[in-house]
């Protein structure tokens, strides 16, 4: 992919497409969907590009999107998948858009479900991505009355190592920063389903073997080419200098300074200390841990990791066309991904892109300190702030 085009298209849409879910109250007949109208295609239909960039008549209308959750089994043995079926129905009289990654259209690649065992929340152990700010093709469009239905397996995304009574609900929380008005921040929430699940192990919940981590040398899986390996060595070193710069800044005099407040919001000594702890661990990882880079991913995002699998990073298409340093760069992406590991800052992805991250810092400093892209932009520090 051409780097200049990617960047232009991404930033060109940022101002118009800041809502992950919105409704356009037009009666444009070009809604996506198949013949029987029960499921929608993941890709927008022709003409939806215009809807995706519409800036008028925006209406956050989440209460008109009903989410239903179903499981056909009440008891699961240790070798059975945990299959649940999510149905999202547009009960409004106009089309509604929702970001794909707030739906199960591409599977479970974000913590889209709340899972608890005997009343205690269990960890999400699935993928965390770095994605570009939303583009037109990142939306699913539901026509009035249309239902999107997907069956997904949660066994590889949540920690099911302990036998118990599990309760599952779909819960995509849309950040305050995305909503047209702060009070419209909302969430997609389903009914609960309960099941008795026999504990099992998966590659994601098995403890990583230790003992060789003192040897710091990146290794590669997924057929990385020579030039990709070379770019990764440079990116890793760039990420280490970003982390070092961030920690140096946070080791200085704390206070309400532009660089801090732009990305992490209103200053408090506690939150400043949290940020410092995060970059201490991120820097330690980048300086001392043996990273594994996987080049097999072919989707349009930058990269992803599993938070319980440090320090393996899966690189995707947008990574290879990103600049080596600067905003949304290769080095910055490595900082973003490193922040996700439970062994470092255990961040989530509440929102993506500079514009939305700045809004998040204003509306929710706590979420900003838990947001991977905010950590990346603070580290990249471009344009430079004091
Ligand atoms: Zn991420």
Image (tube, grey):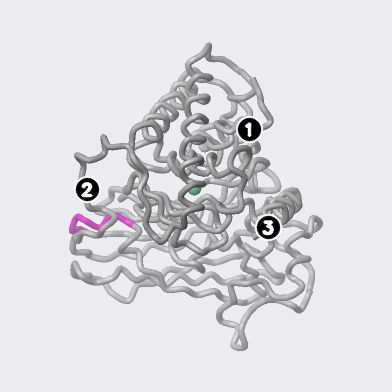
> Is residue 159 located in the magenta-colored stretch of the structure?
yes
Crowd tier of the residue under label 1, counting other residues whose Cα lies within 10 Å: few below 14, some 14–19, many 20 or above: some
In which image quadrant can residue 154 be found?
A: bottom left
- The answer to whether 193 appears left or right of 108 in the picture is left
- Residue under the point 65% across and 32% down: 382
Quadrant for the N terminus, please: bottom right
Which residue is label 2 attached to? 207
Q: Start and end of the magenta stretch?
A: 158-164
> Is residue 363 located in the magenta-colored stretch of the structure?
no
Give the spatial CA distance, label 2 vs label 1: 38 Å
Task: Give whichever of 26, 333 is nearer the camera.
Answer: 333
- Residue under the point 53% across and 19% down: 249
Task: Give whichever of 156, 312 is nearer the camera.
Answer: 312
Of circles 2 and 1, the one toward us is 2
Q: Position of residue 49 (x, y in %)?
A: 74, 66
Crowd tier of the residue under label 3, counting other residues whose Cα lies within 10 Å: few below 14, some 14–19, many 20 or above: few
Q: Earlier in the sequence, mark 3 or mark 2?
A: 3
Disc 3 residue: CB within 8 Å of ligand 1: no
Q: Position of residue 21 (x, y in %)?
A: 64, 58
List the single residue furthest toward the front.
226
- Residue under the point 41% across and 33% down: 282
Q: Is residue 274 above or below residue 121?
A: above
Q: Earlier in the sequence, mark 2 or mark 1?
A: 2
Q: Which mark is residue 2?
A: 3
Please identify the dominant SS of the magenta region: loop
Q: Earlier in the sequence, mark 3 or mark 1?
A: 3
Give the secondary structure at mark 2: loop
Q: Which mark is residue 10?
A: none
Give the secondary structure at mark 1: helix
Which residue is label 1 attached to? 362
């Amino acid at each position: 992919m051409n780097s200049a085009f990617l960047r232009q298209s991404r930033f060109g849409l940022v101002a118009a497409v800041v809502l992950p879910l919105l409704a356009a109250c037009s009666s444009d007949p070009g809604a996506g969907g198949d013949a029987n109208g029960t499921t929608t295609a993941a890709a927008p239909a022709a003409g939806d590009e215009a809807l995706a960039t519409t800036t008028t008549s925006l209406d956050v209308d989440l209460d008109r999107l009903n989410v239903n959750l179903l499981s056909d089994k009440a008891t699961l043995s240790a070798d059975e998948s945990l299959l649940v079926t999510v149905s999202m129905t547009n009960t409004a009289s106009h089309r509604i858009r929702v970001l794909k990654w707030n739906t199960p259209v591409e599977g479970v690649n974000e913590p889209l479900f709340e899972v608890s065992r005997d009343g205690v929340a269990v960890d999400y152990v699935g993928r965390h991505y770095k994605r570009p700010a939303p583009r037109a093709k990142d939306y699913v469009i539901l026509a009035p009355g249309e239902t999107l239905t997907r069956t997904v397996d949660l066994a590889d995304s949540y920690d099911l190592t302990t036998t118990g009574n599990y309760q599952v609900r779909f819960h995509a929380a849309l950040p305050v920063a995305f909503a047209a008005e702060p009070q419209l921040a909302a969430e997609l929430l389903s009914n609960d389903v309960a099941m008795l699940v026999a504990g099992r192990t998966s590659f994601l919940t098995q403890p990583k073997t230790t003992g060789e981590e003192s040897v710091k040398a990146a290794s590669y899986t997924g057929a990385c080419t020579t030039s990709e390996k070379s770019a990764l060595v440079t990116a890793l070193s760039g990420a280490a200098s970003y982390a070092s710069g961030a920690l140096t800044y946070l080791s200085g005099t704390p206070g309400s300074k532009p660089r801090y407040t732009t990305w992490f919001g209103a200053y408090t000594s506690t939150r400043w200390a949290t940020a410092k702890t995060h970059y201490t661990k991120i820097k330690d990882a980048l300086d001392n841990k043996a990273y594994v880079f996987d080049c097999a991913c072919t989707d349009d995002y930058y990269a992803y990791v599993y938070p319980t699998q440090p320090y393996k990073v899966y690189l995707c298409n947008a990574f290879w066309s990103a600049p080596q340093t600067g905003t949304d760069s290769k080095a910055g992406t490595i900082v973003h991904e490193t922040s996700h590991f439970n062994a470092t800052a255990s961040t989530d992805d509440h929102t993506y892109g500079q514009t939305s991250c700045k809004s998040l810092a204003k509306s929710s400093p706590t979420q900003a300190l838990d947001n991977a892209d905010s950590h990346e932009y603070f580290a990249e520090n471009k344009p430079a702030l004091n």
